[in-house]
Amino acid sequence: MDLTALSRHVSESVGAEHVLNDPADCARYALCGATPNLVVTPGSIGEMSQVIAAAMSANAIVIPWGGGTRQAQGYSLTTDSEGQRPVLVARTNRLTRVVEHEPADLTIKVETGMTATAFDALVRPHGQMLPIDAPLPDHTTLGGMIAAAVAGPRRLGYGTLRDLLLGVTVVEASGRVSKAGGTVVKNVSGYDMMKLYLGSYGTLAIIVEASFKLIPRPRASATVWCAFESHTAAFDLIDVLHSSQLTPVAAEYLAQAGGVDVLGRLVNGCTMPYAVAVRAEGLPAAVERHLRDIPQFATAAGAVDAQILRDAAHDLLWARIADLPQTMEATSDEMVMRLSCLPSELARALQDAATIAERRDLPLLIDAHALSGVAYLRVSGANEALQFWHREMLARWPRLIVLAAPAAISDDLALWGSDPVGLNLMQRIKREFDPRDILNPGRFVV
Amino acid sequence: MDRAQLSEELRRIVGPRSVVDNPDALMTYDSDGCVMDLHDPHIVVLPSATEQVAAVVKLAARAGVPVVPRGAGTGLSGGATPMHGGIVITTSRMNKILEFDARNERVRVQPGVINFELSQYLNQYGYQFAADPSSQKACTIGGNIANNSGGPHCIKYGVTGSHVLGLQVVLADGSVIWTGDGTPDAPGYDLTGMLVGSEGTLALVTEAWLKATRLAESTRVVMALFDDIAGTAATVSAVIAGGFLPAALEVMDRLAIKAVNDAYKMGLPESAGAALIIEVDGVDDGLDELLAEIVEICHRHGAIEVRPARTAAEQTQVWAARKNAFGAMGRLAPTYYLVDTVVPRTRLPYMMEQVQLISQTFNLPIANVFHAGDGNLHPIVLFDRRDPDQLHRAHEAVTQVMKLSIEQGGVISGEHGIGMEKQDYMPLLFNDDDLGAMAAVHESFDPTDLINPGKIFPRKQPGHNLAMQRRAKVNLGDEEENEFDKATRVIKAQGDNVWI
């Protein structure tokens, strides 16, 4: 099947109005400057299955596409030597149905083209939430969150999708549809396939339906915002939080030379270069306890300011923090990275990041889930300086992945950090699931 | 390689005192807690180090003999039963807690460590291992990992999988890898996540980094007594729907209360039809008010009495009653069959009614002790296996519970696993394509079916067969392409619902 036949075939499957084949129209979906040949938006799981089956018959490359917020991540597609393989973008945006939702069960099953915002609007009236804090929630889809294993500040209190994803339906590289898990909160009926698809970046299958465990919305929620003059003092507070009996749901370390102004303007007169934002949620009395104890801890650690934020200020602060790792609107000289390490190593890693940035005078913004060992780093500057920074950091911190980088240097960086252990095994899994290398070939570590 | 040669080689690897091949002794290893189908192993080894396990696996691969991992043998789905004989590798001598790293809240252990002993060890530092299956005084961490075990507190703290950070495993070719060390978000597929709950069919766990969970500042426990089990089920549904986040919600019915009293002199009120154990924990502030609200819900749903367990000793006693319930069943009947299914939590009251009906239909008493907060049922069918008719009725009753659970949107195992007990029920829940995806994972790890063969996948469709069928469907030559197009047309003609 050639491109023309494939185009005709998928148009018959999903309706011509849901297929783009004009290069001008397809350009919006370009990856690393390469424009796909077809952009298809199936309206049902059955249609998605037909499209992918047809793509496989045509030996096409398929890029699964949700909100497109994380497509800057990964290497360029591997194509064949002649560059003859058609490239098809398979969008999930019309897959937005609610499949099952019995609010009293605190579980839900939905199609995954739904955005995080739409999902929240669905469960919020029932006093429920999925506390993942995805960046750009108006664009980010549930499928994209699963594929990229998105996790945010509140992973400290509620865990990640690893703990909340109960079941999936996927369209595999052959077009075959399979499901795993269920819509119950505890399940060991067969292998835990959810773990396989979670964080597989669209290389094994297209996730089209998902069931989640929902969390009751807390009765109270508030923030203690602590500003510091020094990195060390900020981490002193983090250490105290770690050894206390308190149960904050998020503890973010923020750093920006010249003042954390991305967020600081939300907080009266904050011009300090370091801040720790601690979020407490739950029973009103428990939240008040946090608001009482944490400012004391902060003062003892040397904070120059500790403010309590509630209601709109609290909500806005956390929405801004959630967006900090976004890459959809990264500037052309900007590199965005995620560093992970053991929590005990984080202070040292972030000190390294700052020291290396200073050497080339690179502006650096850090947002770290300080008790979880995860940090998002944004650094901008000339390509050579960015490469220097990345090389120096990667040599010290092997779990440094690039979420976005200027196109000119992107493919030369070790975008996924150092090779994972068990890579052979992962490659065998990829071959079993996608023997013809249809799905996102070459982009991921596997 | 004959048995004598195999035995000699194994003695060389693990030492002569760590090999069991006396036929009488081998019978001890013919099953775990699931005694439906017994198979003696050819030989049992008790390694004490990872390198020994790796050498045994390499030898087994060379000899073409299966290996079957075994912890304490408390499993309830036959996961440790050597279906095709072979070498049972038991972890009882790999029982050391190797390292506790408080700053990173992680602990490194060998797989033979007993769950309860790990928590006792962590308690002294103010931590616990949060997964606490009822068998925790006997079961091992390796078994917990294999089965992704739950326990009363996983409603709040999550199942074993949420507490495993990384695994050292011996793969089917005898190579050894670490899948993680507690550093979050490693790129690549989540091998740790795949291995947890794989019931020892993908690789052998030889060490693990586990998450240590901080003990809560305060805990409150109450036991609410009801006239019947329906009241407890309705209360549980209301507590969940109300958005409370209890640390445990456990139910015992009249038969279970009686058994526990008979066996352990617990002094629980036998006039009550059912007891609901409720635990809340967290920072001290607000806990009393939270508990008061939950107690109010209990009263609204017909609780006849609510007994607080005020002291730590009283709380321990309540939990001892709950966790010893299965052991006490021997007081009621010579044999019991413990069923493990899960339904959405709103379906609990209906399921409890149905379990009563099933008990009447098959004329067998059924006790209930279960993790109500998770919707995880454990009907315990009481019978005498020496009576073929009772045995038959017990099987029928169990099948009925599974079918009903699926019908209500549930699944066939919440925490005990599939093993060989439920392998033939898997097609009730999954079609060939669903099973095929699981088989593809199996094929990636263990293509020669060396490790714990004959489990999880239906007897008529072993994993390897499913994986080969699946491959045949993908690797289509040009001449087969038409067939694929034909299949696509059929799919299209049948519409969307065919897949779902």
Image: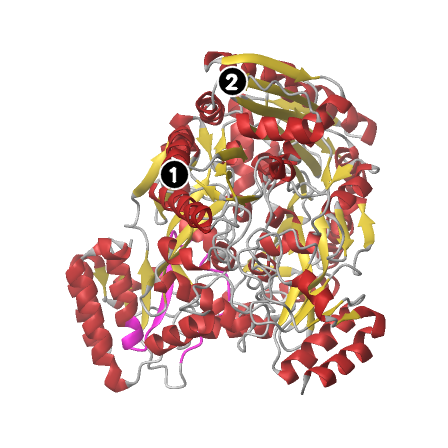
**Most frequent secondary structure within the magenta stretch:** loop
Residue A418 or residue A168, whichever sits in front: A168
Of the residues tagged 2 and 1, which is closer to the observer?
2
Residue A363 can be seen, yes or no: no
Camera-side residue of B460 and A292: B460
Range of magenta residues = A55-79
Residue at x 84% of width, y 37% of height: B124
Label number found at residue B226: 2
Which quarter of the rendered picture does the N terminus of chain B lie within? Answer: bottom right
Residue type at mark 1: give it. Phe
Examine the structure image and report whether residue A286 is included in the region drawn in magenta. Answer: no
Q: Which disc is residue B75 wearing?
A: none
Q: Nearer the viewer, residue B13 or A241?
A: B13
What secondary structure is found at the residue carrying circle 1? helix
Looking at the picture, how far across and down is residue A129, in whole percent? 46, 33
CA separation in Å, label 2 and label 1: 38 Å
- Residue B429 placement, left or right of A382: left
The picture places residue A345, in percent across and down from the top left corner, at 77, 51
Q: Is residue B409 above or below residue B307?
A: below
Q: Residue B30 at what x, y percent from top left?
A: 63, 63
- Residue at image location 32% in from the left, 65% down from the top: A176
Can you say whether B456 is above or below B379 in the image? Answer: below
Examine the rendered structure and indicate whether residue B307 appears above or below residue B140. above
Q: Amino acid at mark 2?
A: Phe
Mark 1 and mark 2 in contact (Cβ < 8 Å)?
Answer: no
Q: Chain of mark 2?
A: B
